[in-house]
Image: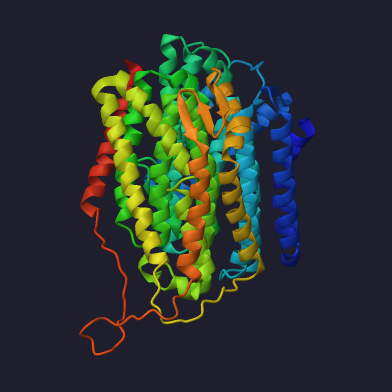
Amino acid sequence: MQTVLNSLFLIPLLVSGLLLILPLRFTSMLVVFTSLLLAFFAVYLFLNVREPYFFSVPALFDQMVTAADVLLLLYFGWMGLRRKSLWVLLLSLLQLATLLYLIGILPAENADQFMIDRLSIFMFLLINIISGVIAVYSIRYIAGEHCSPFRKKFFLSVMCWFIAVMNLAVAADNLEYFFLFFELTTLASFLFIGFRKDEVSVTNAYTALWMNQVGGLAILASVFFMTRNAIGAVTFTNLLAHAADDDIMLPVALLTVAALVKGAQMPFSKWLLGAMVAPTPVSALLHSSTMVKIAPFMLLRLSPVLRDTPVAMVVMALTAFVFVAAGIEALSQDNFKRILAHSTIALLALMMMMAAVGSPVTIIAALTLMMFHGISKSMLFLNAGILERVFHIRQSSDMDKLAESGPFTALVITIGFMSLLLPPFGAFMGKWLSIETLGDFALNSGIFGAVIIVAVASGGAVLSLLYFKVMGLLIARSGEKDKIRIEHTGFIYSSTTWFLLLLTIISAVCLPLIMMHGLVPASAQISGQPVVAVFHGWNLQLGNITLPLLPLLLTFLLLPGSVAAAFFVRFRHADRVKEYMCGEDVNYSFSSFYFTTEKASAFFSVTGIMFFVVLIIVALM
């Protein structure tokens, strides 16, 4: 097993280097082969690892990690100095000073640096399967980018080492190691967002850099307080082992801050929204499988300590607020990628809220949301790239005739939104489990619980309105074309889309089995509590919640059929003539109402800042 783990870390790094030196014509085969291999290793680990597995690396690696930390922070500082970015420079100096101080006081570690459990393996599956698809898609996309051949190879190279870093981040138990991998993902986002090197891209890259540095500084501060309080080894495992200690909450709160920053919760949402200027595969990579999923991953890792604490209540209040606010922001957008970006921030808030609640069923809800959000958002973003490159569409208001010019693309995007909204897809099931468990929470939490559940219901309603608005545009037809033909977008675009579409459908059909054999054991291991999960005929019993499977299956058979009919069934003899029109055809035009949230955005940011301040104050009390 150790060999397989090493392969997940080393192969992407090796391939990353090869992509830089090999001729461009060899890159396609290398990327496809690597993606298949990494997906196979992730599935192998899922099938063979049941209990947590700890392992250490030689002491030389400790020194290498420390040296890499210092070099990385020096690079960030140099970037801040060159751009004259005060925030980047200041945060780099603060991080460097804290790190150098910690190097002098950290005790020699006897603990293992890495830990693989079911949560890590769940993330391995998400990272390597979804990122692999995105990497393959990028072969075609980056070929059309206006840049030098070396820059195209550089893009694919960064993508490969980014996958390696993500695998390392979800396997790290030692917090100093985790800090390095956390900041390497920050470096990747900086390079990706600034890839096009125009002024907007560079500005947004620096915004992403300093905002994520806030998260890195919070991790270092957490290590500092763990050391000062003599808690012992600076590892996640040791932190969880001291859950009952009074002085543990501040380090936990600081790690929570790092997670919220990486998860682009307000007021740190600007870095993820600014990432939309990057090539579209970057958006898919950041939103779906990897970068932002560190946020719910960290809170799930900390959930046994967070549960039922004042810090958890502040996190729930913040994420409930973001769930509603980001949904409203999404509803006001016309740019398709920005719609997806805002809705990602909203759904991340819901995932983190479920992780903060920390009961076995809410952990299952968070895992379900993470899995289906990863699959659906990657499919939606990759098709946003197809819209951009093949149909030259970037605004949702221009999609009203896509059902005739690109019916397959329109159908896939519609199913992508359905998978985030309707039964029997996993995102719906995750929301269902969330509301059911929050109902119980509300009964025991008075007004606070009632406010939370109202916020979740309101945010869900806003997102539903958003998804129906876009789907309404997608299924609209002008009636100008008698025959609808499937468009040809090329082998790589169509094969990656088909793979994600089939993965969405198969995951929905197999969801009860995935829950029983994947998510329930993972939840039990994360929370340390057993979860009752049994089949009763056509019902799945999860804790106190009963999921009726037969109506969900019937819904699955009904919905795709009705959507396909909307796209491809033509009523040849239907008359579009209205009364009193002298026999003339009616020209139909479809549109949606839009509004602006410019004034509200400032309020959202200030409110978000207040929540972060309250979070730290509560941890200090």
How has the structure been colored for display? rainbow
Question: Is 433 left, or right, of 141 in this rendering?
Answer: left
Residue 158, can we see it? Answer: no
Q: Is residue 429 left or right of residue 493?
A: left
- Name the one closer to the observer, 115 or 322: 322
Q: Is residue 156 above or below residue 433?
A: below
Q: Nearer the viewer, residue 214 or 8?
A: 8
The quadrant of the picture occupied by the C terminus is top left
Q: Can residue 173 be seen in this snapshot?
A: yes
- Residue, x 33% and y 40% (percent of image)? 322
At horizontal 62% and vertical 68% (from top left) the residue drawn is 143
Residue 141 rendering spot, x and y as whole percentages: 59, 65
Picture coordinates of residue 372 (x, y %)? 52, 44
In this rendering, the count of numbered labels is 0
Toward which corner of the image does residue 71 lie, by quadrant? top right
Residue at 44% across / 57% down in the picture? 276
Q: Quadrant of residue 134?
A: bottom right
Can you give x and y, in whole percent of width and height, for residue 340 in the image?
Answer: 42, 54
Percent from the top left, x then y, of residue 18?
74, 54
Residue at 57 percent across and 40 percent down: it is: 511
Q: Is residue 364 above or below residue 393?
A: above
Q: In front here: 122 or 172?
A: 122
- When the figure is inspected, residue 520 is found, relative to residue 37, above or below; the finding is above
Q: Toward the viewer: 152 or 509?
A: 509
Image quarter of the N terminus:
top right
Say left or right for 141 vs 612: right
